[in-house]
Image: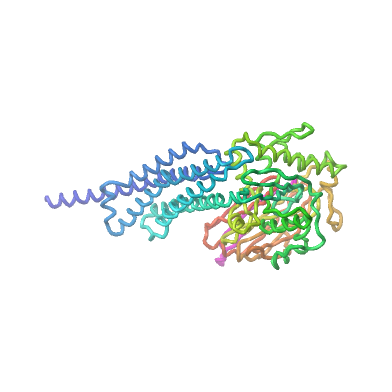
Amino acid sequence: MPLRRAAWASGAVVVLAVAWLVATTLLARAQLLRAEARIATIRGGFAGPVDVDTARELRAAQHEARRARTLTVGPVWWAAERLPLVGRDARGIRRITATAEALARTTVPDVLAAKDELLDASGSGNRFDLTVFARVERRLARVERQVAVAHSAITGRAAPLLPAVGSAYRDVGRELAALRRQVRTLADATRVAPAMLGVAGPRRYFVAFQNNAELRATGGLIGSYAIVRADHGVVSLEKVASNAELRSPDRPIIDLGPEYDARYRGFAGDYLWSAVNLTPHYPAVNRIITALYAHQGGGRVDGSVSTDPVALSYLLGVTGPAQLRSGEVVSADNVVALTLRDAYARFAADDSARKQFLTEVARAAFAKVLSPALDRRRLLGALVLAVAEGRLLAASNHPAEQAVLEVTTVGGALDRAGGPFLHVVTQNAGGNKLDYYLHREIRYHAYARRDQQRVVDVEVRLTNGVPAETLPPVVTGRLDAPRGPILPGQSRLYLSVYASRGAELLNAVVDGTAIATESAVEQTHPVFSAYVEVKPRSTTTIVLRFRDPASAGGGWRPTVRPQPLVVNDRVEVRVDN
């Protein structure tokens, strides 16, 4: 009888111990999820448009990570770690909670401190303290090593027994991978910034102001431009001019290789200023811009930057309105409509006056951005939002710097890394300004057919919202000599859909009717193109179906690269396992 009672007592202890392990595992998992969500929010606010009370979120993340760590210590966990099979999961949970606590306690605060130091480097408008960058680079290098060690400790482990443990591994591993990429990007940018800001001597950059009312792949026709000078951390404006000063040669002056020639030589994309940004691959755009500018006698430039009026509205939202010489005020609320719509009505009879007006707007806005009394954190947030939407791109003609830029979003390179991918590009093929009224909806659906082939359907809905009122001919006219009668305000677009590496087009239809498409490859991506007419105040729907091996993993969400339009796309992604 005593032996039976002892056995029952031992069994009860084991049951309670197992119950305790399961309960504390689930509680720790819940705390980890909350901490992870807060750290992800903080990451979004490192340099981005997310409005985050960083100190509050960090304190909460540290508390939750510490609580998760506390839940996984004690005699029961000590004993569990030494058991066969179960011990592996117990050690794994403790490793995860320890990693999360260190992340919240040390790593994230270090990145925030680096961000603050970088903001302090630009404390006086157009003057940057270049000595700060070396100090921040060293700090970020330490942080990157910490994150790399933590990431290697989490990944590459044997499959756990408990699903909750496996899920925790994946969640924390994913957060560490994202943080590692962000820290590496910030460290790389910090390393090249002094050189790009002229630490070794003056630098000159071509800044293209794109007109989204006449679309090109990277945003729009170059309407005006600036030359910006950086010398030992001091940034100044050398000149601002309209595209009337950009003179095209009568033949190509640069060789971009057979792939580029096959796709763009027929459009004179390598020597006409109006066509330099037909390719969405910004490193190629930069090479053409800098070669053309030097050819026309503008002198050597060290790289280029491209932006648009929507990005300008984000910046003016931080700087406050700019005033023109006439007394007219240009603000975040009116700059897009003023430059892309109203100026065409105001200067309908004088194109030269319109270009001079737009040049003055660019000059006044640039002066505001370089003024000293600015909230640097808000300005950085506006810049990052513009980068995320593809509205701010940059390239350098110095190989070491370009190698860094090219793997970041601001570099604007077509992604060559593989995996599911989608980039929809519409270009104005009518020589007008109707794209101010263009709205796009994009739906991506990946699924497996009955034959087990992985298929992707891409639906693109193009809506021409041009008003019924009479608009200036420069807005609604057609320079492409259309065949047959067209409606006033009818737009013609060159649509290109960039798919995952290895994707094969199965069929394409426009408003239910099958069409033929042009096929090419650009930077490893198959691209399928067709001309599309969109009647005024109506919608045209294009559907393409691909066989897509890149989505074979199931559940992989694609990289959807944006094209900067006046109004951002509405994008819907559905991935069936």
Side of 14 where 362 appears, left or right:
right
Q: Please, is residue 276 above or below residue 318 in the view?
A: below
x, y (%) of residue 534? 77, 52
- Give the residue drawn at x 52%, y 57%: 555
Question: Residue visible at 68% across and 64% down?
Answer: 507
> Residue at the spot x=54%, y=49% of the render?
186
Residue farthest toward the left in the current orientation of the protein: 1
Q: Give the x, y percent position of residue 485.
A: 86, 54
Image location (x, y in percent) of residue 502: 60, 66
Of residues 259 and 4, which is closer to you in this image?
259
Which residue of the protein is positioned furthest toward the right in this rendering? 349
How many badges with numbers are in the image?
0
- In the picture, measured across the screen, residue 256 lies left or right of residue 350, that is left
Which residues are drawn in magenta? 436-456
For the point 39% across and 49% down, which residue is it?
99
Q: Is residue 426 visible?
A: no
Instruction: Give the colour scheme of this rendering.
Output: rainbow
Residue 312 visible at all: yes
Q: Overall secondary structure of the magenta stretch?
A: strand
Horizontally, is 26 left or right of 298 in the view? left
308 inside magenta stretch: no
Q: Nearer the viewer, residue 147 or 509?
A: 147
Q: Residue furthest top?
A: 327
Task: Give the image location of residue 217, x and y in percent.
Answer: 70, 54
